[in-house]
């Protein structure tokens, strides 16, 4: 059972973890919300430290950069590959081939720059509002949406790939368990308030729906790059939506 947690931590973070990996990699998906909560709390703590020091802009930059470092840059790499493949490849085969190329093209560079800028802007506002729970919520929900896509869409590469072992065997039980865990973690993070809870969940689902539909239409399923990209987009959507909520209704 705990071997699934070991695999989830090793997959999603740079943190050194003792123990053996699970034999069934899809079982590690059950632990994604736990890892998301851990990462979210770390990033929220970073933002609080910057807020206490009176430098909100630096705090936001450290949150964004900290997220990249803590995940070994895996998710931002997925976003860049997805942008290059989806907008540079006219056919399914071309898109998958470009996504496998380790080099970052112009579309990927634009996507990365825009994502980092949007994250920084949103987190600056959240830090200024003292909304540290929203920062953790975005990270948590991003890992939940990864599970939703892995559980509902097929693996796109017929020849296999790094994420195939996670997607193979994933199904409704993974969706059910991770949804229950995520929502139970999320509610106290947002001080048991319904409207912030609803805003965060709707924003996360919107990000998952956009990437999921685009990915299914373009390549017929998901890859590791798609799961990384949806994590990044979910954080952007949740942080931006929550910042707007804080401005308008907070």
Image (tube, helix red, strand yellow):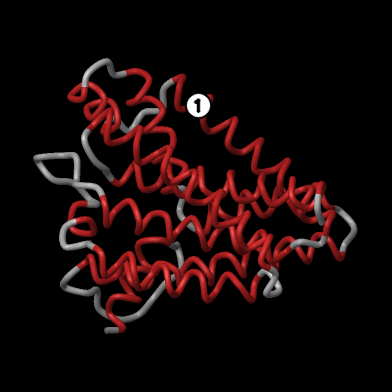
Q: Alpha-carbon neighbours of circle 1 within 10 Å: few (<14), some, or many (≥20)?
A: some
Q: Residue 51: horizontal and vertical position, in percent? A: 83, 61
Total tally of numbered discs in the picture: 1
- Residue 46, relative to residue 164: is it above or below? below
- Tell me the quarter of the picture where residue 177 sits: bottom left
Q: Which residue is mark 1?
A: 109
> Hey, which residue is sitting farthest bottom in the picture?
1
> Hey, which residue is sitting farthest top in the picture?
90
Q: Is residue 124 left or right of residue 5?
A: right
Q: Residue 136: horizontal and vertical position, in percent? A: 62, 64
Q: Is residue 111 left or right of residue 149?
A: right
- Secondary structure of the residue carrying numbered label 1: helix
Q: Quadrant of the C terminus?
A: bottom right
- Residue 194, relative to residue 65: is it above or below? below
Q: Which residue is depicted at the point 54% across and 74% down? A: 185
Q: Is residue 178 left or right of residue 164?
A: right
> Quick one: 86 or 240, which is closer to the camera?
240
> Quick one: 92 or 81, which is closer to the camera?
92
Q: Residue 2: horizontal and vertical position, in percent? A: 31, 83
- Tell me the quarter of the picture where residue 130 sits: bottom right
- Residue 179, relative to residue 246: is it above or below? below
Q: Which residue is depicted at the point 22% across and 19% down? A: 91
> Quick one: 175 or 16, which is closer to the camera?
175
- Residue 188, relative to residue 13: is it above or below? below
Q: Residue 113: horizontal and vertical position, in percent? A: 58, 30
């Amino acid at each position: 059972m705990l071997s699934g947690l070991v695999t989830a931590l090793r997959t999603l973070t740079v943190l050194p973890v003792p123990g053996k990996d699970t034999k069934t990699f899809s079982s590690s998906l059950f632990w994604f919300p736990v890892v998301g909560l851990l990462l979210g709390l770390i990033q929220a703590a970073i933002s609080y430290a910057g807020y206490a020091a009176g430098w909100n802009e630096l705090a936001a930059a450290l949150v964004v950069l900290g997220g990249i470092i803590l995940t070994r840059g895996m998710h931002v790499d997925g976003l860049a590959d997805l942008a290059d493949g989806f907008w540079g490849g006219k056919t399914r085969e071309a898109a998958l081939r470009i996504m496998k190329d380790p080099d970052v093209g112009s579309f990927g560079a634009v996507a990365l720059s825009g994502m980092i800028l949007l994250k920084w802007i949103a987190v600056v506002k959240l830090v200024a509002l003292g909304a540290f729970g929203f920062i953790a919520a975005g990270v948590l929900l991003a890992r939940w949406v990864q599970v939703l896509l892995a559980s509902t869409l097929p693996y796109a590469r017929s020849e296999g790939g790094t994420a195939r072992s996670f997607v193979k065997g994933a199904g409704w039980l993974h969706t059910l368990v991770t949804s229950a865990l995520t929502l139970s973690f999320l509610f106290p993070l947002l001080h048991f308030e319904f409207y912030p809870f609803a805003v965060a969940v709707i924003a996360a689902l919107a990000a998952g729906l956009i990437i999921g539909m685009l990915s299914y239409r373009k390549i017929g399923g998901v890859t590791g790059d798609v799961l990384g990209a949806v994590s990044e987009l979910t954080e952007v959507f949740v942080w931006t939506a929550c910042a707007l909520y804080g401005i308008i209704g907070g």
